[in-house]
Image (tube, helix red, strand yellow):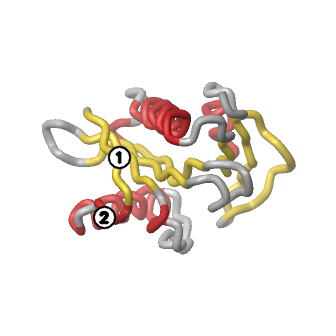
Amino acid sequence: MYLQVHSFSSLSTTRLYELLQFRQEVFVVEQQCAYLDADGKDTIAWHMWLEDSVKGTMTAYCRILPAGVSYPGHASIGRVISRSEARGTGAGRRIVEEALAWITRTWPGVPVKISAQCYLEDFYAGFGFRAIGETYMEDDIPHRAMVLDAV
């Protein structure tokens, strides 16, 4: 697997279609969550994925948002997914590690805030995120805000 990082404007239409389809497969179909995925933030996001070097398909994906887009004073990582066949292989962990390293290099000193599905709190805590505030419902799924101080 190799890492790809692209701004919206550098995505080919084929890659854009693939990443939107991938997100819908996981969030809309698998998690049975009807929500507006195209939320207007993709055009200012950085899109990161791990690509299967043999199949040429995305194995894990996330989008990275600059400070102030989702949360004042915080960059953000969202839409974190991995293909069902890649779960348990470390692909999800690697995409988050890569995203955090990219944020640190690109925007040094900027903290990160995420809206994590509650069942993934321990996963994100493993990267140093800490839960803040109460659990809330987002698209009928329990979530918790989590922050990672700048390193």
As helix, strand or loop, the secondary structure at mark 2 comes to helix
Q: Amino acid at mark 1?
A: Val
Quarter that holds the N terminus: top left
Q: Which one is in front in this view, the residue at disc 2 or the one at disc 1?
A: 1
Q: Tell me the tag on residue 74.
A: none
Residue farthest toward the right in the current orientation of the protein: 133
Q: Is residue 148 visible?
A: yes
Q: Nearer the viewer, residue 65 or 52?
A: 65
Q: Which residue corresponds to the image point at 42% horizontal and 64% vertical from the top-left?
A: 24
Q: Tell me the tag on residue 5.
A: 1
Q: Earlier in the sequence, mark 2 or mark 1?
A: 1
Q: Amino acid at mark 2?
A: Leu
Q: Which residue corresponds to the image point at 33% horizontal and 65% vertical from the top-left?
A: 9
**Which image quarter: residue 21?**
bottom left
Q: Tell me the tag on residue 16.
A: 2
- Counting labels gives 2
* Residue 82 x, y percent position in the rendering: 41, 44
**In the picture provided, is 25 more to the left or to the right than 69?**
left
**In the picture provided, is 11 more to the left or to the right than 94?**
left
Quarter that holds the C terminus: top right
* Residue 11 x, y percent position in the rendering: 28, 61
Residue farthest toward the left in the current orientation of the protein: 54
Could you tell me how far apart the alpha carbons at marks 2 and 1 are, in whole angstroms?
12 Å
Q: Which residue corresponds to the image point at 65% horizontal and 41% vertical from the top-left?
A: 110
Q: Nearer the viewer, residue 141 or 69?
A: 69
The crowd level at tag 2 (other Cα within 10 Å; few <14, some 14-19, many 20+) is some
